[in-house]
Image: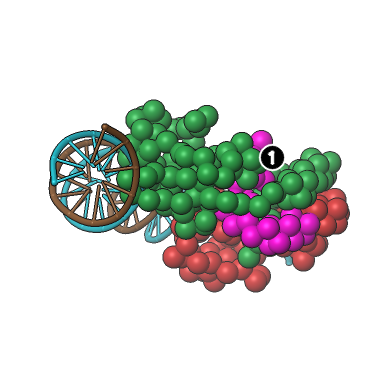
Chain colours: A red, B green, C brown, D cyan
Amino acid sequence: MLLRIDTSSPEPLFEQIGSQVRSLVARGDLAAGTRLPAARDLATSLDVNLHTVLRAYQDLRDDGVIELRRGRGAVVADVPDHARLHAAIDQVVAAARDLDVPPATTMALLKEALR
Amino acid sequence: MLLRIDTSSPEPLFEQIGSQVRSLVARGDLAAGTRLPAARDLATSLDVNLHTVLRAYQDLRDDGVIELRRGRGAVVADVPDHARLHAAIDQVVAAARDLDVPPATTMALLKEALR
DNA sequence: GGATTGTTCTAGTTGAGCCATAACAACTAG
DNA sequence: CTAGTTGTTATGGCTCAACTAGAACAATCC
């Protein structure tokens, strides 16, 4: 797993983990059916508590990104192709850069638009 | 000011304030040069501490959204038209809905793309 | 049976967010 | 010049979410 944790970031660790897995799955770097590391293993390799990883996994499960089963582990769920979504996001990033809009503002706009 | 604060939300109060001002400015509801309420006044009307509002204002200033001056108050800065950005964001929202992508995933994708 | 792995429970620590108060500095208005 | 306004900075205390720690339990795999 190529996950990076920044313990000095204000963003909660479980959100950092979840966020990165979401990206990997959505962009296809983690194909459907792929098995994620066992929570205990990932916790060890990230030097984080087991429960922190589990909370991230459970959030992902609640959103249908992965499936969890005892004894079996965490498996990437079957999700549709996100090509169109990625193209749209690229447009947003390009526009934000051209207009010199700060990332926090762009995030605020999307967040509100998604509501 | 049309600001709404949700004290039961997990999102910090200062972020809620900043986020809403960002949206208002970016969408043109607050024209450049418009004066924002004095921090003390806004704090009172939102029933929030002065420092909470000030932190939001300072974040906005750091991003060039507003200008702050003692004795003068907070004034929204001169920003370009964001029409293109809004159009792009609408595309993202539409794609996310069509593909059934959870909001958290969409946010994660944009956040990473903005990095 | 034994190892693996998610689930659940209890309990403690830490730090960000927030509030309260106060003094100070720059600006405005009279 | 004087008085009021407003942002700036500093200190202290409180609360709760995040994180950690340890343990037992249940489903699955080999």
Q: Residue at x 38, y 38 (%)?
A: B38
The kind of residue tagged 1 is Leu
* Quadrant in the picture for residue B29: top right
For the N terminus of chain A, the quadrant is bottom right
Q: How many marks?
A: 1
Q: Residue at x 73, y 50 (%)?
A: B85
Decide which of B76, B3 is in the foreground and name it: B76
- Majority secondary structure of the magenta segment? helix
Decide which of B88, A62 is in the foreground and name it: B88
For the C terminus of chain A, the quadrant is top right
* Quadrant in the picture for residue C24: bottom left
Residue under pointer 1: A114
Which span of residues is magenta-colored? A90-115
Q: Residue A99: within the magenta? A: yes
Query: Is residue B77 depicted above or below A43 in this figure?
Result: above
Decide which of A43, A21 is in the foreground and name it: A21
> In this rendering, does residue B108 appear at all?
no
Q: Position of residue B53 (x, y in %)?
A: 39, 42
Judged from the image, the secondary structure of the residue bearing numbered disc 1 is loop
Q: Residue at x 42, y 36 (%)?
A: B37
Q: Is residue B35 left or right of residue B30?
A: left
Q: Residue at x 53, y 67 (%)?
A: A5
Q: Position of residue B86 (x, y in %)?
A: 73, 46
